[in-house]
Amino acid sequence: MRIIAKIRAMAEAEVLGLVPDRIIRDIKREDPRPLFKAFVVSHEGVATPTMIGIGKTIQRWFGNAVKALAMKLRIGTKVFNGHEEDNSHDQRQSVGEVIGKTVETINGFLSAVAVTYIYPKFKDLTFDVASIEADLMIPSDVKEFEVQEPDVLAVTGIALGDSKIDKPAFPGATLQAALQAFAEIPPKGEKTMTLEEIKNAVRESKFKPSEVFRPQEIISDPVVQDRIEDMKDSVKSAGLRKNAEYEEKILTLETENKDLQGQVGEFSKQSLVIKGRDVFTEILKERKLDGDEKFNRYVKKVYEKSFTPTEEDKLKTDLNTFVDGQVDEYKDIFGEAVKVGAATGDGGNGPANKGVGADNKGTAGGDLDLLDPANNDLIPQD
């Protein structure tokens, strides 16, 4: 049969730097110079705690029990000045609280470490040993037994004391480290720390610069200022290089775009020239000027040498104007009118084709009135 009994096992202090950042920030809002102390509250080996209702006992603590106790230790657990007759918290004034914990091997023994924050009004009291107040499941009425993981039920508090008066249950239960965090004036009776000692204390406690100094103090440091300026220059130089790269790329793209536009324009001109030839041929057919072989040779040579199409929408109008001018030019040069009529096997010189001369009622480039007997040999003459 197992029963629940109480123990108070002494422990030694070990390290700081196990406290979450948010807890440190919260403490600093109320206490600019907080005092942190770390204690080992349990470790492997033999302990001689006092059990309520039984008295002094001999306990053999195993590693799994040490780990279990560390897991049961809660952030915010109350810390007291010494023990009472029992573990009740009634009428007991708390001198601090647990703000961090861990499990480490110290001096060859697996140890559970608790970091405590000592309230400002109790900073001057001597606390260099610690005892846990815990609930254990142990055999009934025994004074010697082994402590395993299932035996550890809860940690209800931690009692601090003066080693000159209090004797710890664990042999190594002495203060390992204490830090008057962020102190502007060293505590009375203590020597001023050297710069190297301060550096080592901050380094060993794993404090970040922002946890020790205000942001403005960090930024105003000349070394930090120089670094900031170097970073600004570096960023500025990188920005200038990027801008130069972008400008060069933009110039390249603009040049390529201009070349492409030129090529497109040239292709458009060539396409318009090709289309112009087709439209020119259609106009000669529509106006029945393609039957005059001599005129066709002439006008096509002139077209290739002198006509350049400019706008597609005005192409047909411009070509008709061009043909009108060439009909007149042809008559002035060769002294004969252009023969009007559809192209035939004899080159447009069949009976249906009559020249456009002074006696003709038609005009160059126009259609003759074939219903007029004077213009059609097939109609009998009076």
Image: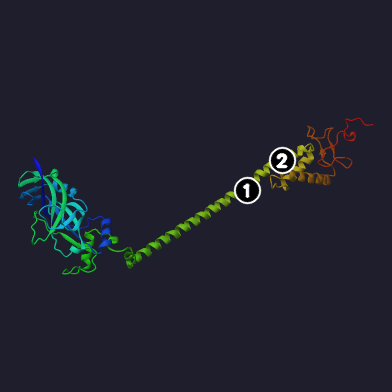
At 85% from the left and 40% from the top, the residue drawn is: 362
Give the x, y percent position of residue 163. Answer: 10, 60
Label 1 neighbour load within 10 Å: few <14, some 14-19, many 20+ = few
Of residue 294 and residue 283, the one placed in the foreground of this image is 283
At 40% from the left and 61% from the top, the residue drawn is: 234
Give the x, y percent position of residue 146. Answer: 8, 45
Of residue 327 and residue 368, the one placed in the foreground of this image is 368
Give the x, y percent position of residue 55. Answer: 5, 51
Q: Amino acid at mark 1?
A: Gly
Q: Quadrant of residue 382?
A: top right
Q: Quadrant of residue 303?
A: top right
Q: Is residue 260 left or right of residue 242?
A: right
Which label was assigned to residue 248? none
Which label was assigned to residue 265? 1
Q: Quadrant of residue 272?
A: top right
Q: Amino acid at mark 2?
A: Val
Q: Eyeballing the image, is 188 above or below 354?
A: below
Cα distance in 3D space between marks 2 and 1 = 21 Å
